[in-house]
Structures are given as C-alpha cells and as structure tokens.
Amino acid sequence: MSECEADGHLREELLSSAQCFQGSFLKVLRDTVALPDGQAATREYVVHPGAVMVIPLLESTDRPARVVLERQFRYPVHSVMVEFPAGKLDAGESTLACAQRELAEETGYQATEWARAGVIHPVIAYSTEFIEVWFARGLKPGPRQLDSGEFLDVFDLPVSELLQWCLDGRVTDAKTMAGAFWLQHFTSGAWSPEWQSAR
C-alpha cells in the first residue's frame, strides 16, 4: 500500500481555487476543499517560492567550534531577531547556488565545503514555504553585498552558547532553532553530513 493510499482517510481534495492577493513574491490563495468526511471547507494560504538557510561553521583547532549568525529587524514581529543567514530562491536557482549566494551577500563569507542537512516546513498551517538547510565550512571572509533596503549585523558565537540561547528564549526564530537541532547532532558526533566541495 502506498503512502497516499494509507493516508486516504486524512487527505483533503481541491474543489476550487481563487487568488486573493499577488505581491512582489508572495501570493495568497483561498481554496475550497472536500474533507475526508465529504464536507467542504475553506483553506487560505500563502504561496512561497521556497528558501534556504545556511549554518556557517567557523572551525579552529585551538578553540571550540563557532557559528556565524545575524541580527536583523523583522517587521511582522517588530523585533530584532537572531538567526542563521537565509534567503528565498530565485526562479530556476538550485538550493545550493542560493545558499552560496546568500552566505556571500549577507555575511561576506565564501565556503570551500557544503553539506545538505535537510528540509523544514516552518508554517505548515498557512504557507507552502519550505527551507532547505545547508552546512558550510572552510569559510573565507570577503565583502558583503546586501540588497537595497537590507540592514543586518553579522557576528559569531560558540555552538554551546547558541544552543543555550535557543533554550532560554533569546533565539525564537523557528528555522534557526531547527538548524540548532542538526548542529547539536553534528557537533556531538551523532550525525555526519556528506560534504562536497564548492562548485
């Protein structure tokens, strides 16, 4: 039995769809769906092109591993947030190319090695957004190339301190907290990604 067949008693089927809003890169749809019991319901959600997040590792033989982070004001929550570098995919862009571009633009760093961690879906109740998570190491500093209207601070922190910030509430960004899960398993030796040279 396929996964779709096994989950048939949970699935909703599209009956009709209407576009409510089209922005510069987001749009909002209102769909009517058939529920598993035959009743109809409305689902409103944001269509997002997808994004990447980078966990940049600063490795050294004479001190504990550190990671590169950013502080950025996020208007919807009216707060300066601590987060890993991240950004949305451009049309036709691979996730690795996007990760390399965003790391260089936002932090100035370029990495010699990359490893894919996995995918997260940060807001499954109302958005199609997915974020592919990449590790980067062998970092070499360079100039930043921020987008027009983009303002952020770049800093680094020991891995242990970032994990504590996630526990005590100084980090509440969902993608960064998910990244900390992979990071904790990587630094403990419980999980090993497959590294590849930068292309």
Image (cartoon, rainbow, N blue to C red):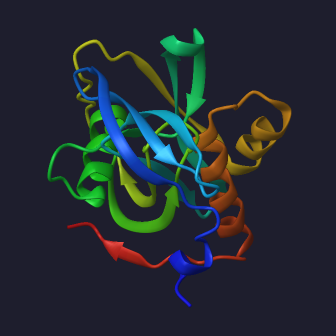
Q: Nearer the viewer, residue 76 or 117?
A: 76
The outermost residue toward the front is 38
Q: Nearer the viewer, residue 169 or 29?
A: 29
Would residue 71 appear left or right of 162 to someone viewing this image?
Answer: left
Vertical order, 129 against 199 (above or below): above
Q: Position of residue 96 (x, y in %)?
A: 29, 59
Q: Nearer the viewer, residue 69 or 43?
A: 43
Q: Position of residue 141 (x, y in %)?
A: 34, 43
Q: Is residue 131 visible?
A: no
Q: Position of residue 152 (x, y in %)?
A: 43, 20
Which residue does the image show at 61% across and 49% down from the upper left? 66
Would residue 189 appear left or right of 109 to someone viewing this image?
Answer: right
Would residue 180 appear left or right of 27 to someone viewing this image?
Answer: right
Vertical order, 133 against 90 (above or below): below
Q: Is residue 72 visible?
A: yes
Which residue does the image show at 35% across and 46% down from the upper left? 50
Query: Quadrant location of the C terminus?
Result: bottom left
* Count of all numbered marks drawn on residues in the image: 0
Q: Nearer the viewer, residue 35 or 79?
A: 35
Which residue does the image show at 25% across and 29% down from the upper left? 25
Hey, which quadrant is residue 183 in on the image? bottom right
Would residue 66 appear left or right of 33 to someone viewing this image?
Answer: right
Hey, which quadrant is residue 196 in on the image? bottom left
Q: Position of residue 179 (x, y in %)?
A: 60, 52
The outermost residue toward the left is 92
